[in-house]
Image (cartoon, helix red, strand yellow):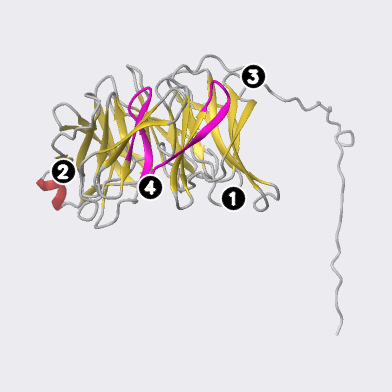
Amino acid sequence: MKFLAPLVFCIAFTADSLGIDQIPETIDTRILPTPSPHWLWVDDVVFNYMGDGRASLIDGDTGSYLGMLSTGVGFMTLGLPSDQSEIYSVETYYTRGLRGDRTDVVTIYDVAELKPIGEIEVPPKRHMSLPTLTNFVLTDDNRFLLIYNFTPAQSVSVVDVKARKFLGEIETTGCAQIYVTGKRTFQMLCQDGSTMRITLDDNGGAKNKAFSEPFFNPAKDPIHDDGARLGDSWYFISYTGDVYQLDSSSGEPTFPESWSLLNVEDRAASWLPGGGQFLAIHKPTKRLFVAMHQGGDFSHKDPGTEIWIYDLVTQQRLQRITANNVVTSVAVTRDDKPLMFTAFLGSTDIEIYDATSGEHLRTVGHMGAGPSALQVP
């Protein structure tokens, strides 16, 4: 038997041999202008390689790509101060890539150049999960950064971003996620359907802890922990489409009567809310945007095929928008001419709509590996 050895030809071409002028490669760098209300941060946990988390910035008006932050292992979301002075990111790194000694830090980035300008080491115990906007938040005065920990012991790490130091931990057994309600207060959802209200002192310690009565039944109809804030209130939606409001305007939490997103016809057609970051609020118009799909029991993570818009004052549906692509995340800009952004975790496309008319404006493709959360300045 004869074996034929593979014959390999290697031909090397150079620019000179082809008669092509050689042009030196250049690196394009830019200084970003003041953030536009129509900019969008696309947070990407990179599920196929979670050691390579990233946050990409795009301009919603043009669809142009503006820059990217490299954010380490198990990236969640960014901390964006209301004064837009800096950017904060809680990041995890291992000495051997994805193994070895673990270090967690809060990295501070410059807004104009997107380069790191400092970091604060924190305990290596932050909660890593499907990214949510309530695992890592800033107090309303932009001073304290709050990080939800789960080891599975539950606690909140407090960082003073002005003094650039870790201050300590607050034990929060049985309560999860962080819903800021003021300069020094935040709420957490607890296992029995109640909330825990924590008031911070000037040193970032827990000056007061208080529990509410349960406001929903977690055994009968759980709520999504993906809440949306409007002023002193947080809005939550249950698996079956009921809307619950946590109102902190009086200091102590109160819970107005719940109401439903769905009418008889909607329920008969099996419409339900769902996704990851599936609801958003436009503050100037008090409108609630919800990703909806047709499904059955426990389909609460299924992507939406439509976006339904409600008036939070009248509790009436105003509009239904057919999504250009299925939706797991939705965000709405805060200005008077708002854009709506949507993403699907299984796609690299960002869809951009006029949030008032519902018109689909453009698609921005190739945004990372799987957009998992959307943030507007």
Taking the image as shown, residue 254 lies to the left or right of residue 177, namely left
3D distance between C-alphas at marks 2 and 3: 48 Å
Amino acid found under the numbered disc labelled 1: Tyr
Are discs 2 and 1 less than 8 Å apart at CB? no
Amino acid found under the numbered disc labelled 3: Arg
Give coordinates of residue 221: x percent, y percent.
Answer: 21, 52
Residue wearing tag 4: 173
N-terminal-most mark, 1 or 4: 1
Give coordinates of residue 42: x percent, y percent.
Answer: 49, 34
Dominant secondary structure, magenta: strand
Q: Which mark is residue 262?
A: 2
Q: From this view, report whether residue 289 is shown above or below residue 60.
A: below
Q: Residue furthest top?
A: 34
Give coordinates of residue 50: x percent, y percent.
Answer: 57, 48
Residue wearing tag 1: 49
Q: Secondary structure at mark 3?
A: loop
3D distance between C-alphas at marks 1 and 4: 31 Å
Which segment did they paint magenta? 160-188
Quarter of the picture holding the C terminus: top left
Residue 16 appears in which quarter of the rendering?
top right
Q: Secondary structure at mark 4?
A: loop
N-terminal-most mark, 2 or 4: 4
3D distance between C-alphas at marks 4 and 3: 46 Å
The residue that appears at 24% across and 48% down in the rendered structure is: 272
Q: Which mark is residue 327?
A: none
N-terminal-most mark, 2 or 1: 1
Crowding at mark 2 (Cα within 10 Å: few <14, some 14-19, many 20+): some
